[in-house]
Amino acid sequence: MGDPATTTSGTSILDELSAIVREHSFRDPMLEAVRHGSMSRAGVRRWTLQASLVVREFTRFISAIHANCPDRDSQQLLAENLWEEHGRGVADRDHYALVRKLARSLGASDAEIDNAKPLAETTMYIEHCFDVTRNGSFVESMTALGIGVESFVPAFFGRMAGHLSSNYGLSREDVQYLLVHVTEDETHARRALEVIEAHANTSELREKAKKALREMLAVKRTFSEAVYRYCLCAG
């Protein structure tokens, strides 16, 4: 009997998921604009406000996966992820508190943060995350979030933090929301891969995992491009 995480062609599920990521390769234009300092400060603030709407709901995505997770070790991983999102019990290190701090460092008021209106694409992205984590299997939701979202965060946020500091005068403390993800999400993504490899143990689950990843990457790209266009309009 072969390895359950290996297809009949001898390709592992992780190899197939990596191939999908390469196939849907995408460079967020916001990162390029911030790298060159061509995005206005008001535009960066808009980006942060839209991101904050996703961050506010992210703990609920993790909770939904946990609720659907039958494996005790994987439950532990998700519980640790949730604890980190909440700042390990320190209120001002909670990730939503940190993204609010980032928005304020770019000139947003608390009222502006509280009353930020999502773009249609932001709403679509959030609703898609709720759908896959609530209604998808444990393997589908782990693939969508662990690979489709968190695996990209360390490199993207690390570079974004550096460019915001060098081109927009933000301090290391201002960009802590970005920096905490560099190490935390790298660990999450690696451990998510281990979980997927262990539990994507049928052809049906492997196909569902691949479909969930393709869909998440497409929705995330639509969201990123829409937010970038919106930020350009800020001047």
Image (tube, helix red, strand yellow):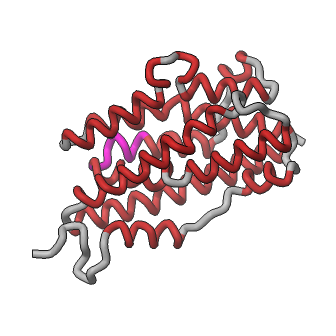
Magenta stretch containing residue 101, yes or no? no
Number of residue marks: 0
Q: Nearer the viewer, residue 160 or 9?
A: 160
Q: Is residue 201 left or right of residue 220?
A: left
- Where residue 112 appears, as percent x and y from the top left, is 73, 21
Identity of the residue drawn at 43% across and 59% down:
213
Q: Residue furthest right?
A: 235
- Where residue 49 appears, as percent x and y from the top left, is 69, 32
Give the answer, above or below, for where 1 lies relative to 195. Answer: below
Q: Nearer the viewer, residue 215 or 86?
A: 86
Q: Nearer the viewer, residue 143 or 223?
A: 143
Identity of the residue drawn at 40% across and 43% down:
131
Does the image show residue 102? no
- Quadrant of image for the C terminus: top right
Give the answer, above or below, for where 194 lies relative to 91. Answer: below
- Quadrant of image for the N terminus: bottom left
- Where residue 219 appears, as percent x and y from the top left, is 54, 54
Identity of the residue drawn at 82% across and 43% down:
166
Q: Is residue 18 left or right of residue 50?
A: left
Give the answer, above or below, for where 137 lies relative to 181. Answer: below
Identity of the residue drawn at 24% across and 67% down:
5
- Where residue 156 appears, as percent x and y from the top left, is 63, 51
Q: Is residue 74 left or right of residue 27?
A: left
Q: Main secondary structure of the magenta part?
A: helix
Q: Nearer the viewer, residue 235 or 20?
A: 20
Q: Is residue 66 left or right of residue 144?
A: left
Q: Residue furthest bottom?
A: 9
Does the image show residue 52? yes
Magenta stretch containing residue 135, yes or no? yes
Q: Which residues are magenta?
A: 130-137
